[in-house]
Amino acid sequence: MKIHIAHLYYDLLNLYGESGNIKALKHALDNDNDVYIHFLTIGDKLELDKYDFIYIGMGTEENMHIALKHLIKYKEDLKKYIKDGKIILATGNSFEMFGKFIDYHGKHIKGLGLFNYYALDTDKRIVGEKKVHSNFIKKPIIGFENRGSTTKGNLNFLENGYTENNFYGTYIIGPILVRNPELLKYFIYKLTNKKTKLDLKLEEQAYNRKERENV
């Protein structure tokens, strides 16, 4: 099976080693599939319908605004991509781009407007380990937050994010797919309709130790 994964703005939105999510996906998929990773950034033409999975990571506020200026040209393509049920995973502050607007330090920036939430800056930076729950996997999802903004509106995923169809947006970083084997398996199944044969015992042991620490 051929699977095409787009890593959008890999050079701009890759704080805290978020490219590890792409490496984890490829490693888990490579056993039974032909996996192609497409690294795309501003200046590239985004032919979104070619991809089965889109990943966008966390970046500085300045870099996110640069990416948004490019991405907004593809608003209708993104709307169709989401409507068709294809997968987007946006971690850290990148999922803010899909909302109505972003207000940072007195600047008002128009978002993609695909979902009914918006982002505001916070009085104090939010930093630390986090454990949250979702409605699509049994185990809690663990990770890290380091952000100076928060979202308001209709949020329904991970207690601090959003999902609709197969769009998944969350402030949790980590990288999230490296630290959460069950979540990685979930996305593999969504992509292939098969359970991964990859041995994730070491990853599961690391997860269980951290989860027992009551992150």
Image: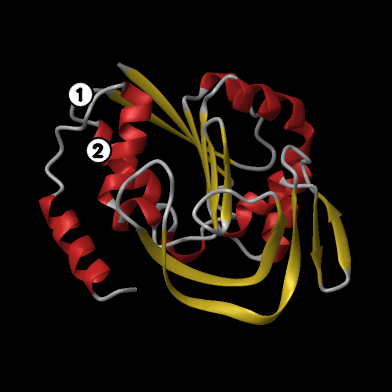
The residue sitting at the bottom extreme is 124
Number of marks:
2
Image: 169 above or below 39: below
Picture coordinates of residue 87, whole percent (x, y): 50, 31
- Give percent across and percent down for residue 95: 62, 50
60 up-or-down from 13: above or below: below
Q: Nearer the viewer, residue 196 or 38?
A: 196
| Residue 47 seen anywhere in this rendered image of the structure | no
Give the residue type at disc 2: Ala
Q: Quadrant of residue 13?
A: bottom right
Q: Quadrant of residue 186 in the image? A: top left
Residue denoted by label 1: 32
**Residue placed under numbered mark 2 in the picture:** 28
Mark 1 residue type: Asp
Query: What kind of element bears circle 2?
Result: helix
Name above or below for residue 51 compared with residue 139.
above
| Rendered location of residue 194, percent (x, y) | 25, 24
Looking at the picture, tell me which residue is in the foreground, 15 or 138: 138
Left or right of 49 on screen, residue 4: left
Residue 91 image position (x, y, % from top left): 52, 53
What residue do we see at 67% from left, 21% from top?
80
Q: Is residue 133 left or right of residue 43?
A: left
Which residue is situated farthest in the top direction here? 1
